[in-house]
Image (tube, rainbow, N blue to C red):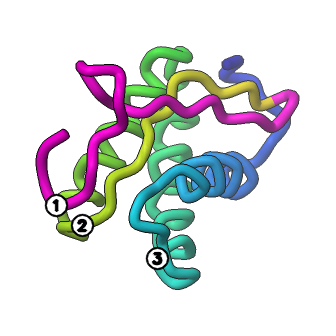
Amino acid sequence: MSAQSSRSADELGAIIAEAYAEKTRPPLTPGLIGEMREIITEAVREAQAAGASQAEWCERINLTLDRTEMSLHSAVGPRLAALDADVGVAQMVHRSEAGRPLRAFGGQ
């Protein structure tokens, strides 16, 4: 992703949050989706301010998702693999060593 994206942090945060919520299990409530959007948007602002590279963007967002999921104690969602800000697409991938998404409440 280019550090010079024409999209705002709010737009990028919404794009990532929607892609995350789409694949998260159990599904997030509308309230949690809103909270995730705010949390992700703040991480996007920090990445923009730091002039982060594509890999750094993903790492920053994914660390934010890790911390947020730990505080929820139940949701398990994908992680950001790539972000095409010009097109407005966040590519998400599930975390797993066995080729299967992790399940909520522990284990694979």
Asked if marks 1 and 2 touch (Cβ < 8 Å), the reply is: yes
Q: Work out whether 89 lies above or below 64.
A: above
Instruction: Give the main secondary structure of the magenta stretch.
Output: loop
Question: Along the line of sight, which residue is nearer the eye, 11 or 105?
Answer: 105
Asked if marks 3 and 2 touch (Cβ < 8 Å), the reply is: no
Label 1 vs label 2: CA separation? 6 Å
Q: Position of residue 83 (x, y in %)?
A: 65, 27
Q: Position of residue 24 (x, y in %)?
A: 46, 55
Q: Which residues are magenta?
A: 86-108
For residue 95, which numbered disc appears in the image? none
| Secondary structure of the residue carrying numbered label 1 | loop
Tell me the quarter of the image containing the N terminus: top right
- Mark before the other along the chain sequence, 1 or 2: 2
Between marks 1 and 2 in the image, the one whose residue lies nearer the viewer: 1
- Mark before the other along the chain sequence, 1 or 3: 3
Q: What residue is disc 2 on?
A: 74
| Secondary structure of the residue carrying numbered label 3 | helix
Is 76 left or right of 67, judged from the image as shown?
A: right
Q: Amino acid at mark 2?
A: Ser
Q: What residue is disc 3 on?
A: 32
Label 3 vs label 2: CA separation? 12 Å
Q: Work out whether 34 lies above or below 61.
A: below
Q: Amino acid at mark 3?
A: Leu
For residue 105, which numbered disc appears in the image? 1
In the image, farthest residue toward the left: 106
| Secondary structure of the residue carrying numbered label 2 | loop
Tell me the quarter of the image containing the C terminus: top left
Q: Work out whether 102 lies above or below 86.
A: below
Q: Is residue 95 magenta?
A: yes
How packed mark 2 is, by other alpha carbons closer than 10 Å (few <14, some 14-19, many 20 or more), is some
In the picture, residue 3 is in which quadrant?
top right
